[in-house]
Image: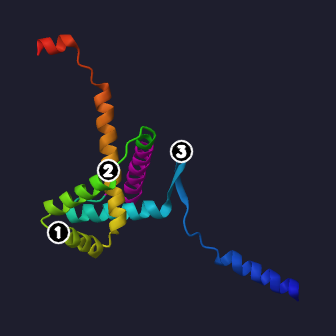
Amino acid sequence: MLGLFTLFLFQSLVHAYVPLDRIVAIVNDDVIMQSELEKKVRSIRGQLQQQGTQLPPASILERQVLDKMIENRIQLQMAGRTGVKVDDEFLNQTINNIAAENQVSLSQFREILEEDEYNYEQFRENIRNEIKLSQLRKRQVENRIIVTEKEIDIF
């Protein structure tokens, strides 16, 4: 009788198993989870719909979003290895500027984000990452530009 109960319990557990999340990409020492991808796809889909842009097929949109997420992760890892950092003071000033450009106070801006179901802390990290990526790209471009004395004289 105990064996039958154990078998029944085991079968119930096997059938009740529902994966909570799964890895969709491994980017060096980092991973992109299915839930992250789905959230980003929903966000992009919403933006495209607001702009009145025709949506690509779901599989294509998902692939494009995943590719962009992988590219961003690689670039953020490169920024970290090369010492690109964004301090809180600069980040706060940038967010204040964004609020000012939208002609709202910071507290109003936070409320707007919350109404749109956008977590303020996640917004801060996204802005921090965008600044890091911008600084990395700028650094890479500056390192590739070489101006010779001859070019200066010609100019």
Q: Say whether marks 1 and 2 touch (CB < 8 Å).
A: no
The span from disc 1 to disc 2 (Cα, nearest Å) is 22 Å
Q: Earlier in the sequence, mark 3 or mark 1?
A: 3
Q: Earlier in the sequence, mark 3 or mark 2?
A: 3
Q: Which of 1/78 is in front? A: 78
* Quarter where residue 77 is shown: top left
How many residues crowd around disc 3 within 10 Å: few (fewer than 14), some, or many (20 or more)? few
* Quarter where residue 115 is shown: bottom left
Q: Which of 61/152 is in front? A: 152
Residue 105 disc label: 1
Residue at the image position 41 percent from the left and 46 percent from the top: 76
Is residue 128 rendered to the left or right of residue 152? right
Question: Which residue corresponds to mark 2?
Answer: 130
Residue 55 visible to an observer of this rendering: yes
Residue range in magenta is: 56-77
Queried whether the magenta region covers residue 64, the answer comes back as yes
Residue at the image position 23 percent from the left and 55 percent from the top: 94
Three-letter amino acid code of the residue under disc 2: Glu
Label 3 sits on a secondary structure element that is loop
All told, the count of numbered labels is: 3
Q: Earlier in the sequence, mark 1 or mark 2?
A: 1
Q: Position of residue 152 (x, y in %)?
A: 16, 15
Q: Position of residue 71 (x, y in %)?
A: 41, 45
Question: Which residue corresponds to mark 3?
Answer: 28
Is residue 16 rendered to the left or right of residue 141? right
Residue 137 disc label: none
Residue 52 visible to an observer of this rendering: no
From the image, state whether disc 3 or disc 2 is nearer to you.
2
Q: Residue furthest bottom?
A: 1
The span from disc 3 to disc 2 (Cα, nearest Å) is 20 Å
How many residues crowd around disc 1 within 10 Å: few (fewer than 14), some, or many (20 or more)? some
Q: Which of 107/70 is in front? A: 107
